[in-house]
Image: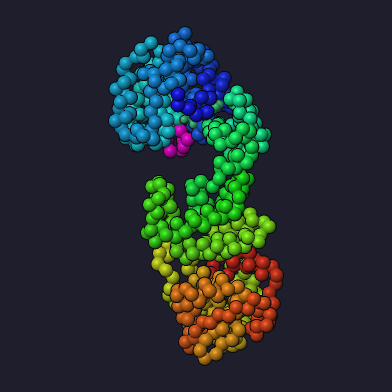
Amino acid sequence: MAYLSLYRRWRSSNFTEVLGQPHVTETLMGAIKEDRLSHAYLFAGPRGTGKTSTARILAKALNCERGVSAEPCGECTRCREIAEGSSLDVLELDAASHTSVDDVREIRERIPYATAGGGRKVYIIDEAHQLSNPAFNALLKMLEEPPGHVIFVLCTTEVHRVPATVVSRCQRFEFRRLTGETLTEHLKHVAAAEKMEADDDAIALIVRHARGSARDALSLLDQAAGVAQGRISRSTILEILGEAPEDVLLDLAEAIASEDILGVFAKVEELVELGWDPRQLLVQLLEEFRALFLAHRGVTDAAVDPEHAERRRSLSVRFTSAHLEWVLQSLADAQADMRLSTHPRLTLEVALARSSNLEVRETQTVVARLERLERALLHGSAAAAPTPAVATSPAPEPAKTSEPATKKVAASKPAPAPKAAPAVAQVDGTIEQQWEAVLEAIGAVSRVTHTNLREGWVIDVNEERVLVGFEKAFHADTLSKRPEHVERLTSVFAQVFGRKLRFEAEIRPGGRGDAPAATEVSEPTAIDLVRSGLGAEVVEEVSRN
Ligand SMILES: Nc1ncnc2c1ncn2[C@@H]1O[C@H](COP(=O)(O)OP(=O)(O)O)[C@@H](O)[C@H]1O
Ligand SMILES: [Mg+2]
Ligand SMILES: [Zn+2]
């Protein structure tokens, strides 16, 4: 005989066996006893909380051969047929696969016939929110003039997608997630009855993972029993969970696209709590973003299932290519750091915080303000008037900048700037001032170039080249090897220095200690921290008027 999955074998067969929904089951039992059932019910709630089971129990209660009863026998032919889903008096329609009017019409055509045994027909419409509008209209007609011997039970996980006209004609029950305690007890009971041995912390992990769904909990226990040699331990469960499911990764990517930093943190928290390893998550995220990057350029991976590919594609267009580059770079950096990190989760979170660029941009704005303020204090207001010179220069960014907020460059200048600089101005002054102007100009053009450049410091400028020191080869390489960066740099150098200059990088592992440029302004450590932690940089001035 084919193996029947645990959650099917353990389907509640009586109202009293439906756990955690007394507000539903007790009300229904009362209504059956007093013969005041509604014509239509709406069972709403998360999956695996007992909606379908309860609908079938209701059908049995009304059709049991031993008479209508809140406690159907479960043994007679009709009870058994209903339990097996083969009864003609109980029609289960899965709206997910029957969305059309015809399907609803079929129900209507069947309605005139009373049940074989004189009971009441029960029509269960699962995932009711998926019905098409015409199908809903057809259903509505039936709900308006329901024949006496028919009861409709609409089940849905997304009640907000069911038209209000339909909802208002049904008696509505909310199915709740089962509490951890109820699930734990249930799992222990099932495990014992099935002669499975499971450690308490394995059960606890399953319960956390199932998030109130009895079905998910039982499925996981089932899988664990298949994998474990003997006793089910916590590590058995972790082994099964293995890689984070693809849709979870896309959820994370979506939060990043929406710059929903709190959402990102909540997701990471959830995943880590559930036992996923931050290192593993990072690797998978890198792969997902690589795929998103390709999808953004119209390259699809034939190997993934179409639904996932479609979600990936539509998500990818919500990113600009600059943002995707930025995320990839942040994640790649994190991977390098991860090897040494004693707090891999923190490393992951910082990388994701950087990736969700709203946070970074906001920090950038704050850092920009602080820097200007600081410069004003140190050098007087003349130095405080910055030269965000390239406000009008076209941004040579890759196409598809569907990100309206990004490029509102220097709309306002908070510092008093009486001698407002022309849009593109050659900057005289010390090499540090010129370098500041370069950084600011680059910031207005490209976040990615800017982030890399600000890791460096100017060493020297002569007639041919600008020599920039970097502590890490990574940033130097990124800038010198990628044509788009080189192009941006050369064009900004020309603006600031008034002549065509090459970009030249030099690695100085000791840092800028011996560099001529960086001695004058020492920055507050708080800024340093924010900046290095979040990849902060000056890209944007946001007008607060
Ligand atoms: N409230 C519950 N009490 C006990 N078991 C449940 C409950 N809800 C779901 N289950 C388990 O999950 C399986 C699927 O439940 P089902 O009634 O189809 O959930 P839903 O229709 O809400 O998705 C059942 O066979 C049973 O094993
Ligand atoms: Mg169901
Ligand atoms: Zn019966």
User: On the picture, is 511 further left or further right than 538?
Assistant: right
Query: Residue 351: x percent and y percent?
Result: 58, 60
Would you say residue 531 sits in the magenta stretch?
no
Looking at the image, which is closer to me, 497 or 135? 497
Q: Quadrant of residue 101?
A: top left
User: On the picture, is 247 further left or further right than 377?
Assistant: left
Q: Residue visible at 52% across and 61% down?
A: 327
Q: Quadrant of the N terminus?
A: top left
Looking at the image, which is closer to me, 403 or 232? 232
What is the span of residues highlighted in magenta in the rendered image? 156-163
Query: Residue 107: x percent and y percent?
Result: 33, 24
Would you say residue 158 sits in the magenta stretch?
yes
Q: Is residue 30 above or below residue 514?
A: above
User: On the picture, is 59 further left or further right than 516?
Assistant: left
Q: Residue visible at 60% across and 42% down?
A: 238
Q: Is residue 11 above or below residue 406?
A: above
Q: Quadrant of the C terminus?
A: bottom right
Q: Residue visible at 40% across and 28% down?
A: 125
Query: Residue 333: x percent and y percent?
Result: 57, 64
Q: Is residue 258 visible?
A: no
